[in-house]
Image (spheres, helix red, strand yellow):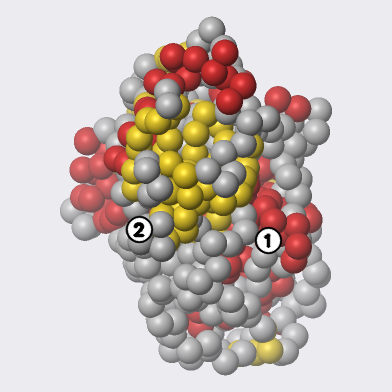
Amino acid sequence: MHSLTGTTLQNGKYQIEQVLGLGGFGITYRALHTYLGQTVVIKTLNAVLSSHAQVAGFQRKFLEEARRLARCFHPNIVRVSDFFEENGQSFMVMDYIPGPTLEAVVQEKGPLSEADAIHYVRQIGSALSAIHAQGMLHRDVKPQNILLHQVTQDVVLIDFGIAREFTPGVTQTQTSALSEGYAPPEQYVPQARRTPALDIYGLAATLYFLVTAKVPPPATLRTQIPLSAPSDLQPQLSPQLNHAVLRGMQLAAETRPQQVKDWLALLSPLAGVTSSVTVPVALAQPRPPSVPVSSQTPTPAAQLASQSTISQVSPQKTRVIAQLNTVPSQQTRQQSGRAVWIGLGVLSAVVLGSGLAVLSSRSPEPEPVAEAPVVTQPSVSAPVAEPEPEPSAPVEAPAAELPPAEPAQPEPPEPSPSPEATASSPPPEPSPTAEPAEPIKTTSNATGSIAPFPTGTARDQVRQALGRPSQTFRRGSWPNTTADLFEVIPNQLTLAYLYDRNTLQVRQSEASFGNGVNMEQMQSALTQMLGSTPSSSVLNALEAVKARQRKSYRFRAGGKLEGVIQRNPQGRLYIAVWEADLH
């Protein structure tokens, strides 16, 4: 190999010091800008290409790479400072980033903390958004192409060698260059539609590696080698991160978030977790004290709701579904979620009222005062008749009444029965007041969000992302279905899913929102549930229902989905989307 080490370029302006990296396409050197006394990086084509029949094409692509980088001025993208030709060879001059790659950092120290990993991924996500705004894709996002600046502790995205321009919605030919484990399935196909979802897969896979120290299996082998959820490898990881990684690494491009900002919105900044880097986040509220569960005090969910802050914009202006300053631990979610679900009347014991499914009779969030929740349940003997003045079914097109649902045995069993009415055959639900009066501990202060899943999602994927359901139903609201309920953010965001008993895929997706969730967050959730942007009429109806200008709205989407937006009798806003042939 012919090396330029020790030579000078541009009449002594640059002095080549050593080789930094060598690939099939190019070679990079560390060099000294002799006029300024600055260390720089100089990249040129590999000498072996000089005799190649397509050398002119390689030179053109090299110039294109330099121009692409020059168009993307961003603090987390390596900067191009010069480009020149000498002796028939092209050279690109870039800033020198002192520090290791994130791959080297993880290989040396092991998995990063969740806070550090999210901090770095948000920076690279911001860089990718700038790239996409220029109509380009990076197409090689991976830890090896991310440098950690040893002085600023910021990360910088490098190596735009296979970056390409893209036209939304157009199928184009792609090169075969890719990195297994970080490349999505569509990158293996020569003719494929290019979208930002390609880079989102690489970014999510990078986060997977940072927190697990494991390279994900190649996308083409994931049917034989299933992707282990990050929390399976590192149990301390939050449900928010787990969910974000799995959503970003969906094999089908259309099921991933379509914009980087939407994917970043699934992550939690984890303001209260000790990090080795400085994260520009807003000051978190003090951690609330541990509160024992009793019949005379609010549940931990109520306490958390009183301390929560539902926010539209995260520190980097990314949209979130819901955000609060304390995320309950897995144990707390199971305990407080079950207490709220039973005590506040999400369901009429085991009989669903005249709503569409699991969440339609969800009660409102409690006021942050030390009062026991009031049970406002309809009678199980007449599920059609609601005691509240407003029906929970849509006014325009009332839904069919729901059959009883049989819940799984609650875990762990609790000693006292619920004062609520129950169906004739299942055992009575346990009372939340019988929980042992021991303090419920929460995780460190954090903010977080989880978006709903659309129909067609596998039950295992839902449970991997959201953790153990707050309640599981052996028999769902409609024939041949089962159901899960998740108290994601107590008193603010509750999700439920009806699965086909045979395929175990989501047939109906539901979300119930507290009063603190704003319109943009609800719109984002509805988009996730539909898998596409809602029509203007649906969005207008959502605004009207939220503003209490109408009670409900029934709609169709794409011919295959139906949905409803309504206020349930207790005042919570409820959205459901289901496959049209379900009911």
Q: Is residue 282 above or below residue 472?
A: below
Label placed on residue 311: none
What residue is rendered at 70% in x and 25% in y?
220
Q: Left or right of 15: which side holds 117?
A: right
Frontmost residue, 581 versus 140: 140
Local SS, label 2: loop
Q: Which residue sits at x=33%, y=23%?
A: 167
Q: Amino acid at mark 2?
A: Tyr
Mark 1 vs mark 2, CA separation in Å = 33 Å
Q: Residues within 10 Å of mark 2 (few under 14, many from 20)?
A: few
Residue closest to the far front: 11
User: Could you tell me the amino acid type at mark 1?
Assistant: Val
Q: Quadrant of residue 309?
A: bottom left
Residue 130 in view (yes/no): no
Residue 276 vertical placement versus 429 (above, below): below
Percent coordinates x, y for residue 314 in the rendering: 38, 64
Residue behind mark 1:
105
Mark sitting on residue 35:
2
